[in-house]
Amino acid sequence: METMNALMFKKVGQIELERVPVPTVQEPTDVILKVTACGICGSDIKILEGKHAYKENIILGHEFNGVVVDIGASVTTLKPGDRIAIDNNPRCGVCDFCRMGISSQCVHIKENTLGIYKHGGYAEYAVAPESVCFKIPDEIDDIVATQVETLGTVLNGMNTVQMQPWDSVLVLGCGPIGYLFVALAKNIAAQTVVTEIDPFRQGVARQLGVSVFDPNVDHLEKISKALTRGNGFDIVIDAVGTQLENALNYVAPGGKVLAFGMDDSVKATISPYQVTRKAIKILGTYIGQNTCLPAIKILQTGKLDLAHFFTEILPLERGLEAFPKLGLDLATLKRLPKQAMKITLKT
């Protein structure tokens, strides 16, 4: 049996490089690809911490792309040699949510998500259904193409908040997700501000040309008033998953709070009176919603500022080196100062 290298998530706090069987076509809709590159997502860090949904003994990695090497009998849109990016969340298409146009809530996603519940892209080869494969145009290189699904999730958030050219926008957290929100917002909104506590990522945020504040040092509630005619921000985006309570202190009456980041270990206490009296809209989005193709169109133009997004490329075999650089000590599960924005594994 042919084998390959893969980073296998064993259990909370444990991920190992192993030799595992190369996947083969099992279903008529299967697409086998030679993985070219796979980004390490913040949610992978949270899986290792036990703060995100997970399944043990799974090859992580959902920000991946590659070249088709084999296809199932019913695949009609792809052929060997095609470069493809992946939406890692296959939908069933027939549950109530899929049929109502909110397939992000598909009842079968939990059992099908690549890189979380099924094997993903921290490997030399991967398998995906045809329905989640998107051809990559030549203008998008292999590293940028790892972010098709990630940008798609952000575009779902942008569709939800319906950002306008006159809006003032505050993004809480400038990890990769916050970076993408800022990169989009600064080209749309009248004012874009971001917060970040990590010194490395503060430096990256400043290179985007927006105002950056440290919530551990700066009085954000006062700053939010000072910057917005005393009103607060029209849109506040929690790109971390821990900031909903704080977001309500920074948003303007009639404004919108987007709860985007995910951290299952966090609980929030809010005042329903405050939300009602100030007519605040609290919005939530999950993964992408028919947004991978729009993401490809944006990346194809080269207009999105990704100059400071990709920090380092590592070979798959050295993938374990990435996690301390991304702020997690695997031995102790303690947080470390970050040394990277996005690290990509190359096979």
Image (cartoon, rainbow, N blue to C red):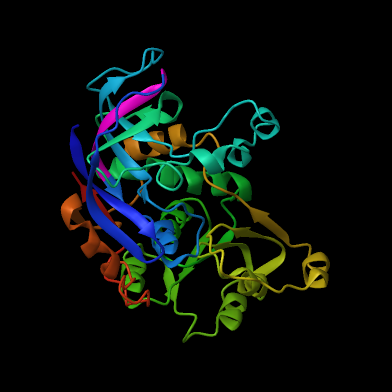
Q: Position of residue 300 (x, y in %)?
A: 33, 35
Task: Determine if residue 76 is in view.
Answer: yes
Is 89 on the left or on the right of 278, as rendered? left
- Tally of marks: 0
| Quadrant (top left/top right/bottom left/bottom right) for the N terminus | top left
Q: Quadrant of residue 124?
A: top left
The residue depicted at 58 percent of the width and 44 percent of the height is 159
Who is closer to the viewer here, 94 or 281?
A: 94
The residue depicted at 83 percent of the width and 71 percent of the height is 273
Who is closer to the viewer here, 93 or 111?
A: 111
On whether residue 232 falls in the magenta region, the answer is no
Task: Answer above or below: position of 207 versus 127.
Answer: below
Q: Position of residue 346 (x, y in %)?
A: 20, 47
Tell me which segment is drawn in magenta: 28-37
Q: Position of residue 249 (x, y in %)?
A: 66, 75
On whether residue 33 falls in the magenta region, the answer is yes
Q: Quadrant of residue 227?
A: bottom right
